[in-house]
Image: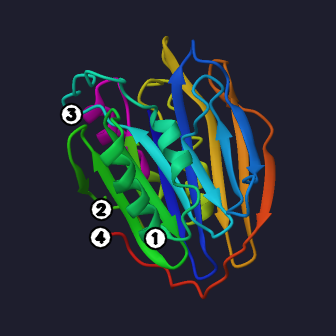
Amino acid sequence: MCTVSWQRSEAGYTLFVNRDEQRTRVIAEPPDPVCPPAPGMVWIAPRDPEGGGTWAFANGAGLSAAILNLYNTSQPPPPKEGGFRSRGLLLRDLTSASNAPACAELLRASLTHNAYRPFLLLILDPDHPPIFRQWDGKALTRKLPHYPFVTTSSYQPSAVAKLRLKAYFRHIARPLAPTEAELSHLHLWHDPRSPETSILMSRSDARTVSILRFSVDADSVRATYRAVLPETPPRPGAPGTVRIPRTTRTKSMPPEPVT
């Protein structure tokens, strides 16, 4: 369960990720730069202590990716041998990519060797259009949303997605070109009359546990992380920011509408 949105500019882009999880799940570790033991790409990501994976990362090339669990599809049976691999570990496999097309190829290669539960995956870099892929447990398809906003929920998946999209339209003056300020406000949206459908959501069994923002420009990649306190109504804690330099600098493309 997650909500992601993004905003592109001449300088780069900003990606927002709300993570929704079961209340029984262990609290995640905030983002920290990861330096590979051999010369390679430095990357930033929060960490799930249970599985060791993550739900979003950004690396020194300015590439980022975010994964969302997919619920409004038939769930495949587990493989006869080995079981499903964690989707959070899949994201770690993609951190070495230098751009969005290369990341998409790494994704395809991983799916030929491992079994995963259904997911949606967003891939961004400053120099290519967004790449969006859907995995239903059997096939990988291209599925780019109409707007720079995607959300999933285990609770009434279709109805919740429609209500959150309506909230997007209420918060965003130009739906194809949101501002960073508009998206920041959107990811804090909580309706006490319907907390389970809010973007900053709260249910008896699950809640939004964190808000992550990646900001990528010509010189640096920054991750700002806010843990959401388990209160009613939910309240984000103090933000913490870590930064790594851009190791690959190319001229950024002008912002493009999502089609």
Q: Position of residue 106 (x, y in %)?
A: 43, 58
Taking the image as shown, residue 248 lies to the left or right of residue 17, namely right
Q: Amino acid at mark 2?
A: His
Secondary structure beneath dot 3 equals loop
Q: Main secondary structure of the magenta part?
A: helix
In the depicted structure, whether residue 20 falls above or below residue 126 = above
For the point 68% across and 74% down, the residue is: 217
Picture layout, residue 199 above or below residue 147: above
Tell whether position 140 is magenta.
Answer: no
- Residue under label 2, please give it: 146
Circle 4 — which element?
A: loop
The Cα–Cα distance between marks 1 and 3, rounded to whole angstroms, is 29 Å
Residues marked 2 and 4 touching at CB (< 8 Å): yes
**Who comes first in sequence, dot 1 or dot 3?**
3
Residue at which label 1 appears:
177
Residue pointed to by mark 4:
259
Q: Residues within 10 Å of mark 2 (few under 14, many from 20)?
A: few
Q: Which residues are magenta?
A: 152-169
Q: Which residue is mark 3?
A: 73
Let me know if residue 178 appears in the view.
no
The amino acid type found where label 3 is placed reads: Thr
Q: Residue at x 70, y 79 (%)?
A: 218
